[in-house]
């Protein structure tokens, strides 16, 4: 697993979520990218119960990624994170006296994978309660695991099909000392997806017309 950037793509003016996804697909295919299967990332939210301190309880996010089908990830709000076997969900059911599932808060991102030279691109539709909330694009530069060594190249590539929607260096990399490797266990990638999901949740509160 190489350096990976996950970003939010706004819905094109006058277009629906699916129409905007189709536009991104077309631009990738015009570049020469080849469709290479599909992907799915999902996130369940849990509230900690029995908090005697009177402080707001921390949230626990349990996430799955089709790229790592035998594992799942549990991220506490503000850290730390835990990588576990896929049956961790069964354990969460047994811990229901400590963690309550936030019903209606499951977020899912599904879409197509593309290959272009050394890049792996995933364009997904983010849904919550069966309603489209937005669009994600994940770009992975496979040969490199040092963000500082390849970010300019990744940015130039994303510019070719995202235009003005190219993101800045993800905060998970910006906070690291130069030269520190991106972990191969996809923690950085899933952290970016979680940031995107939480951003799209907030956008919906004000009533966006992305459907």
Image (cartoon, helix red, strand yellow):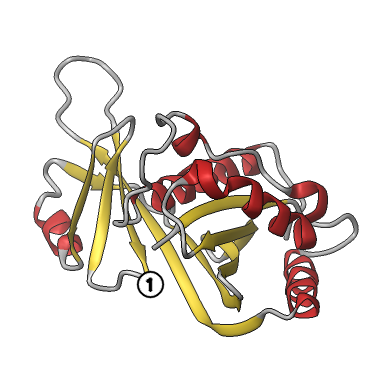
Residue 44 vertical position relative to residue 70 in the rendered view, above or below: above
Task: Say which element carries label 1.
Answer: loop
Residues packed near mark 1 inside 10 Å, few (<14), some (14 to 19) or many (20 plus)? some
Relative to residue 143, is residue 45 drawn left or right?
left
Can see residue 100?
A: yes
> x, y (%) of residue 56?
30, 22
Splitting the image into 4 quarters, where does residue 99 fall?
top left
Residue occupying the point 70% across, 57% down: 158
Left-right relation of 109 to 20: left
Quadrant housing residue 176: top left
Q: Work out whether residue 127 can be spotted.
A: no
**Quadrant including the N terminus:** bottom left
Residue 179 point in image, percent of width and height: 41, 38
180 to 61, vertically: above or below: above
Nearer to the camera, 83 or 184: 184
Measured as percent of width and height from the top left, residue 30 is found at 81, 78
Residue at numbered disc 1? 66
Quarter of the image containing the C terminus? bottom right
Q: Residue at x 64, y 84 (%)?
A: 34
Residue 4 horizontal/vertical position (percent) = 49, 55
């Amino acid at each position: 697993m190489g350096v990976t950037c996950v970003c939010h793509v706004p819905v094109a003016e006058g277009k629906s979520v699916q129409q905007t996804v189709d536009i991104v697909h077309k631009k990738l295919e015009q570049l020469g990218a080849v469709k290479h299967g599909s992907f799915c990332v999902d996130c369940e939210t849990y509230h900690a119960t029995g908090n005697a301190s009177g402080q707001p309880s921390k949230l626990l996010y349990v996430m799955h990624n089709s790229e790592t089908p035998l594992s799942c990830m549990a991220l506490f709000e503000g850290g730390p994170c835990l990588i576990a076997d896929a049956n961790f969900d069964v354990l969460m059911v047994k811990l229901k006296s400590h963690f309550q599932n936030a019903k209606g808060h499951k977020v899912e991102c599904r879409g197509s994978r593309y290959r272009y030279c050394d890049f792996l691109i995933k364009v997904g539709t983010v849904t919550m309660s069966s309603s489209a909330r937005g669009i994600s694009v994940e770009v992975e530069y496979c040969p490199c695991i040092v963000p500082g060594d390849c970010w300019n190249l990744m940015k130039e590539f994303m510019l070719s099909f995202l235009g003005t929607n190219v993101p800045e260096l993800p905060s998970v990399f910006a906070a690291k000392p130069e030269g520190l490797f991106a972990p191969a266990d996809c923690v950085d990638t899933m952290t970016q997806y979680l940031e995107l999901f939480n951003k799209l949740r907030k956008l919906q509160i004000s009533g966006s017309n992305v459907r």
